[in-house]
Image (spheres, helix red, strand yellow):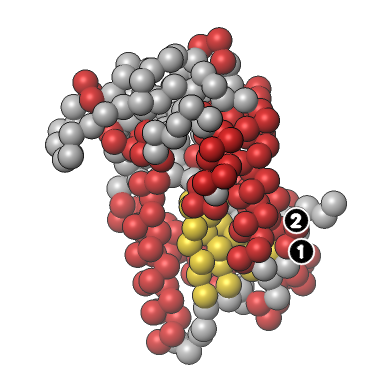
Amino acid sequence: MKDVKIENMDWVSYHELTKKGACKIILPIGAIEQHGPHMSLNPDVLIPSYIAEKVAEKAGNMLVAPAISYGYKSQVKSGGGNFFPGTTCVTGSALENYVFDVLQAYVGHGNHEFILINGHFENSMHLCEAADKLVKKCAVEGITIKIYLLSYWDFISEETIAQVFPDGFSGWAVEHGGVLETSIMLKIHPELVDMSKAVDVEPAKFPPYDVFPSDPTWVAPSGTLSSPLKATEEKGKLILEECVSGIVKHMS
């Protein structure tokens, strides 16, 4: 199977594959963020990167750019907060400008279509800003580009959710470090998961507002917003297959 990762190519091979906008460029974007004591700090990077590679392999006309690992600040009600050791984030403007610059460089190579695969909820609106700004700038310069922005979890169907959460689904808002991400990591990087350290917690319940400075007492000491104990490699496989096939269907 051919290597779809741009970083592993020499420049001549890359140029041959991308000249005249022949390929869509996939850019995974994640975050370095705690995911409980049972898992590494980089699921938000590894998961969209894995999905990007599988999508590119199946689609045949796509290449995967090196992932952007640092994301927007972890928020208490979606990622446990920015006060856990190891969580290493940037400002929204920094992320927006970085993504803009990276995409602009790829446009300079002759690429015209891009797929941003987001793996960190908090990134979303800043990626929208980067995409919108670049599309407008290119239009002024007489260059037509198209940027697709997606988060992989939006491709998971209700049927799959019912299989992954047979006892009921508490919602995406509390899935940080829970069954979803842990199951996927058990499938793609089991060496980075230690289920003996997994902590059983009730799904987090938050007030209908945010507060600054953030209140650490809103989050369980483990940092997860729900329990990962029912995560399995089989569930991860099911989730990934649906995400990859769905993205290929829509983006090819």
Q: Left or right: 115 with respect to 204?
A: right
Task: Name which residue type carries label 2.
Answer: Glu
Residue 134 at x, y percent in the picture: 42, 73
- The secondary element bearing badge 2 is classed as helix
In this rendering, the answer to whether 129 lies above or below 40 is below
In this rendering, the answer to whether 125 lies above or below 119 is below
Q: Which residue is mark 2?
A: 57
Q: Are marks 2 and 1 in contact (CB under 8 Å)?
A: yes
Residue 17 at x, y percent in the picture: 75, 69
Q: Left or right: 45 with respect to 128?
A: right
For this orientation, the residue located farthest to the top is 196
Q: Which residue is mark 1?
A: 60
Residue drawn at x 38%, y 54% as measured from the top left: 124
Between the C-alphas of marks 2 and 1, the distance is 6 Å
Residue 247: mark: none
Residue 143 at x, y percent in the picture: 51, 85
> Does the rendering let one see residue 5?
no
